[in-house]
Each structure stands twice: as C-alpha cells, then as structure tokens.
Image (cartoon, grey):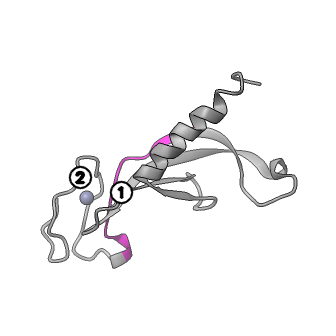
Amino acid sequence: MCTRDWFDEVCPSWCVREHHADDQPADRYHCSEASYLPAVVAMEDTIPVTASLQGTDLQVWLGRHIGDTLTWVVIEPDERREPRLVLSAESAITLVQRLGVQLAQVAPGS
Ligand SMILES: [Zn+2]
C-alpha cells in the first residue's frame, strides 16, 4: 500500500506493483504478477491467418486503475505489446467458458 496524495486505497490482494509518488497518471494502476505460457500466435493480420504464426511467450496479468472498480485481464506477448487482448474480468471468465466449449470439439494435438 502507498499513502501518496493520489493514492488513498488499499491494494487488492493480488497487487505486486510498487506505487511511487512520482508515478505518472497512466502508471497508476494495480498489477498482479504475470503468468507465462508458451504459445503459437498470429502476430499480424495476414491471409491466410496462419501465415504469421510464430512461437512466443504470452503473459497474462490482472490490472485495475487506482480509484476504479473495474478489474481487467491482459493477454499479450512477453516481448511486445501487440497483439494485445484486454478484457474485463467478467469477459475473461466468459472467454474461458467459450474456449472450453470450442476446444471440447477437438482432441488434444489434432
Ligand atoms: Zn497496488
């Protein structure tokens, strides 16, 4: 927790970010420790969509702006910011459910 004049709330239990008095407004958010996973990702908008597939490490982390109630989930490559998916926590839960439905249709490794 930080007691700066722009910061008057307790960090959520998942926040690992250090907050500083000189943080710029864009940097004033809570952040979880990222989870990493190796993935094959289309990094560009190509035709066919598989033409730009490449291996990368994805990171998944939670965020919430100071003073806000919306918690978001970020999925992005470890080494760059695009392609980047930012979802509300509720949308991420729905995404997990829909992925389960889609992936139940294929056998692992097929
Ligand atoms: Zn925090």
Residue on which disc 1 sits:
71
Identify residue type, mark 2: Pro
Residue at image x 28%, y 47%?
14
| Label 1 beta carbon less than 8 Å to ligand 1 | no
**Marks 2/1: CA distance?**
10 Å
- Left/right of residue 72 with respect to residue 106 in the rendered view: left
| Image quarter hosting the N terminus | bottom left
Residues under numbered marks 2 and 1 in contact, where contact means CB atoms less than 8 Å apart: yes
| Label 2 beta carbon less than 8 Å to ligand 1 | yes
Vertical arrangement, residue 31 with respect to residue 58, above or below: below
Identify residue type, mark 1: Thr
Relative to the observer, which residue lies in front, 32 or 69?
Answer: 69
Circle 2 residues within 10 Å: few <14, some 14–19, many ≥20? few
The image quadrant of residue 72 is bottom left
Question: What x and y, as percent, mark residue 82?
Answer: 62, 61
Element type at mark 2: loop
Q: What is the span of residues highlighted in magenta in the rendered image?
A: 26-37
Task: Name the quarter showing ligand 1.
Answer: bottom left
Vertical arrangement, residue 65 with respect to residue 106, above or below: below
- Left/right of residue 66 with respect to residue 45 in the rendered view: left
Residue at image x 27%, y 67%?
66
Element type at mark 1: loop
Of circles 2 and 1, the one toward us is 1
Residue at image x 53%, y 45%?
95
Question: What x and y, as percent, mark residue 104?
Answer: 64, 27
Which mark is first along the chain, 1 or 2? 2
Q: Is residue 107 magenta?
A: no
Question: What x and y, as percent, mark residue 2?
Answer: 16, 64
Residue on which disc 2 sits:
12
Q: Is residue 28 magenta?
A: yes
